[in-house]
């Protein structure tokens, strides 16, 4: 199982000292301001060390005073707190792809209770680390209070290593209960969006662990959308896209097989993804 330090990427992004709530508020406000000004070269994360549990609880309870909406990931065993400061493009990307998915689910006449949006609900893993994603959904008939089946994590600019670590966190800490993670990276300056779709797989079997090692992410597809060229184009795994470049497998999203003919995998056409990505950069 990956350690908290590996999931927090402390060697790649060394955390700074947590000194006070006021200092954190100033840092969040400054970062949110620079991101709103279009300074998208700015790294959208703040990583802090020496954050005791009581400090985290105070930050969580008073988050409305931080000066921006934030997503919190906390590793109590190493006292590390990661704060993600979303941007306008970031929020448009994940909320509107979620709306697209919901409309497609509605057309299948799937009961509301089988596709319940959980938003940025906090989840806690076996080592007490906790995380908030950008968007998530579950089938409450099968899992009324448990982990989501599908999670979306988004980020801008230099965020891909963090997003990969996010995917690993969900699969590792849910012990494979999370079935599908969609990562969305927005490059505002180049007007490009990279989407990576992951399911989970187990590590190799051993004599001491015949069922396989810990769950880990397995990349299924990379979709790259370029809105800077005219006409805009889409590539899938480095090749020109087919008519349906993105598929979300029904069983991964809902935790059960589809019932044909209405129920099937959720697919996106080139036109739909181009329309969605165009709105992100308006």
Image (cartoon, rainbow, N blue to C red):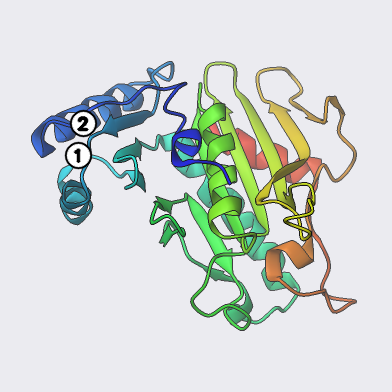
Residue drawn where x is 54% and y is 66% of the image: 147
Which secondary structure, mark 2? helix
Q: Is residue 26 above or below residue 66?
A: above
Residue drawn where x is 63% and y is 77% of the image: 114
Which secondary structure, mark 1? loop
How crowded pointer 1 is (Cα within 10 Å; few <14, some 14-19, many 20+) is rated as some
Whether residue 81 is visible: yes
Q: Is residue 60 above or below residue 79?
A: below
Q: Which residue is mark 1?
A: 67
The answer to whether 64 appears left or right of 6 in the picture is: left
Q: Is residue 243 above or below residue 226?
A: below
Sequence-wise first label, 2 or 1: 2
Q: Quadrant of residue 91?
A: top left
Q: Residue 49: x percent and y percent?
A: 27, 32
141 or 101: nearer the eye? Answer: 141
Q: Residue 70: x percent and y percent?
A: 32, 43
Decide: marks 2, 1 in contact (CB < 8 A)? yes
């Amino acid at each position: 199982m990956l350690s908290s330090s590996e999931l927090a990427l402390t060697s790649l992004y060394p955390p700074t000292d947590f000194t006070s709530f006021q200092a954190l508020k100033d840092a969040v406000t400054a970062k949110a301001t620079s991101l709103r000004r279009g300074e998208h070269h700015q790294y959208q994360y703040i990583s802090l060390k020496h954050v005791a549990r009581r400090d985290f609880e105070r930050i969580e309870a008073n988050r409305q005073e931080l000066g921006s909406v934030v997503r919190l990931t906390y590793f109590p065993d190493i006292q590390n707190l990661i704060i993600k400061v979303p941007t306008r493009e970031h929020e448009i990307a994940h909320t509107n792809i979620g709306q697209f998915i919901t409309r497609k689910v509605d057309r299948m006449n799937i009961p509301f209770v089988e596709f319940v949006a959980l938003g940025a609900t906090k989840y806690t893993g076996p080592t007490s680390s906790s995380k908030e994603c950008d968007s998530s959904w579950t089938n409450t008939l099968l899992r009324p209070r448990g982990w989501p089946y599908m999670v979306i994590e988004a980020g801008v600019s230099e965020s891909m290593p963090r997003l990969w670590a996010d995917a690993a966190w969900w699969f590792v800490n849910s012990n494979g209960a999370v079935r599908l993670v969609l990562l969305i990276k927005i490059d505002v300056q180049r007007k490009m969006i990279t989407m990576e779709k992951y399911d989970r797989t187990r590590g190799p079997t051993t004599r001491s662990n015949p069922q396989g090692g810990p769950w880990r992410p397995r990349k299924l597809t990379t979709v790259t959308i370029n809105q800077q060229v005219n006409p805009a184009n889409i590539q899938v795994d480095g090749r020109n896209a087919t008519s349906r470049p993105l598929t979300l497998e029904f069983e991964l999203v809902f935790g059960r097989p589809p019932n044909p003919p209405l129920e099937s995998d959720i697919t996106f056409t080139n036109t739909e993804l181009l329309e969605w990505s165009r709105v992100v950069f308006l």
